Amino acid sequence: MKKLLIAGAALGCVAVPTVAMAQTSVTLYGLIDEGLNYTNNTGGHSAVQMQSGFAQGSRWGLRGSEDLGGGLKAIFTLENGFDVNSGKLGQSGRMFGRQAYVGVNSDRLGAVTLGRQYDSVVDYLAPLTANGNWAGYLLSHPYDNDNTDNSFRLNNSVKYTSPVLGGFTFGGLYGFSNQPGGFANNRAYSLGAQYVGGPVAIAAAYMQINNPGANAGGSLATDDTDFFAGRQQVWGAGINYTLGSTILGFVYSHTSLNDATGSVYTGNFANTATSLKFDNFEVNVKYQFVKNAFVGAMYSYTLGHFDSTAGNSKPKWHQVGLMADYNLSSRTDVYVQGMYQHASGGTGVAAPLNTAFITGTDAPSTTANQFAARVGIRHVF
């Protein structure tokens, strides 16, 4: 590697003297998250499994910029997701399934990027939740229905991100359907904003996707979507307050799906839902009791509304999640997590939404309760 760098530097010195050399940088980065999971009831059986990417998705990527002068830079990110245990590509086998974009960034005006990118819910609202900040996949809301755990990304997207203006940032994204004669079929758009000042962080975001998963080349591809529906809307708001070594948080999010036929988590619904809604209420707390260790807890209540021609039901989910994390060094930490879910209120018309199903486990519980625990190690490079 050192020889390559020296050779590259030597080649750079051979440049024609009259050509100005722009400042460029390319960074290789990544993260490996590995651990053991225990689930008390998944399809009627307990399970002990080695699984990757729960506190954070395992990944490696390239990030670069080129100084164009006048406070303007060309920027790009290519980020790959993978499974540590098998070495397989993540995100349905995509080479750069987590992120892949290129664009320009202005110190004064913000950034415009194009490619496969995160939506505004992920960018602005998710960092105020437990799962979107310090906990990860296991502590997400049922079925990650609001995408605060970044279950999917949006293809064919153009995104604007503002600079920080007095603690305030905002942005938006538009994802093209790329379908001839179907401009609105599987398109997406989102907006979000966040304010950070002193001990307070406040955020709000909105996202809409028309016919998610309707075509493989659309904004939310068939192999990427969580739900199959005529329209998917997500909106929410949250607040975090820092008090010494403690961060307290509250987040509300609402997900609405029209003409929903099923979910990748549960398969086809027993009856097509004319309307399927989730209202998520979460309180969370993180306590940094020493510099290299923290504990966190969250409680969430999700109220579902399942309306169909065969009848209506209101499934409910109560969740309690805990995490403790200890840094062995600046780049390596070990952690333990636990999640308990209790489901109630579902009827046959809402099947299989009538049993407990913690996001990240293999299958729903055969009862109204499910418990999952994890011990893991994470290394950042």
Image (cartoon, rainbow, N blue to C red):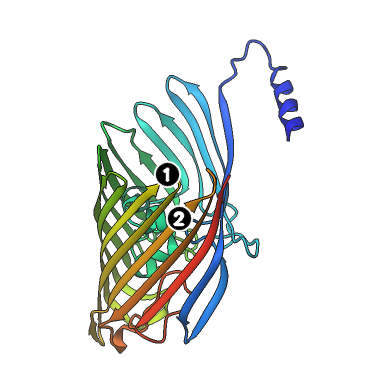
- Residue picked out by circle 1: 291
Q: Quadrant of the N terminus?
A: top right
Residue at (30, 56) in percent of width and height? 285
Question: Which residue is at the far top?
Answer: 18
39 vs 347: above or below: above
241 vs 92: above or below: above
Q: Secondary structure at mark 2?
A: strand
Residue at (34, 33) in percent of width and height? 163
Earlier residue among tags 1 and 2: 1
Q: Quadrant of residue 148?
A: bottom left
Residue 99: x and y in percent read 50, 49
230 vs 352: above or below: above
Along the line of sight, the residue nearer the viewer: 282 or 290: 290
Residue 78: x and y in percent read 55, 45
Q: Quadrant of the C terminus?
A: top right
Residue 298: x and y in percent read 32, 62
Along the line of sight, the residue nearer the viewer: 151 or 2: 2
Spatial distance from mark 1 to mark 2, Cα to Cα? Answer: 11 Å
User: Looking at the picture, which amino acid does disc 2 mark?
Assistant: Asp
> Which label sits on residue 325?
2
Residue at (29, 65) in percent of width and height? 299
Residue 219: x and y in percent read 43, 56
**Crowd around label 1: few <14 · some 14–19 · many ≥20 (10 Å):** few
31 vs 366: above or below: above
> Which label sits on residue 169?
none
Q: Is residue 285 visible?
A: yes
Residue at (73, 26) in percent of width and height? 6
User: Looking at the picture, which amino acid does disc 1 mark?
Assistant: Lys
Q: Secondary structure at mark 1?
A: loop
Please tell me whether mark 1 or mark 2 is closer to you in this view: 1
Q: Quadrant of residue 228?
A: bottom left
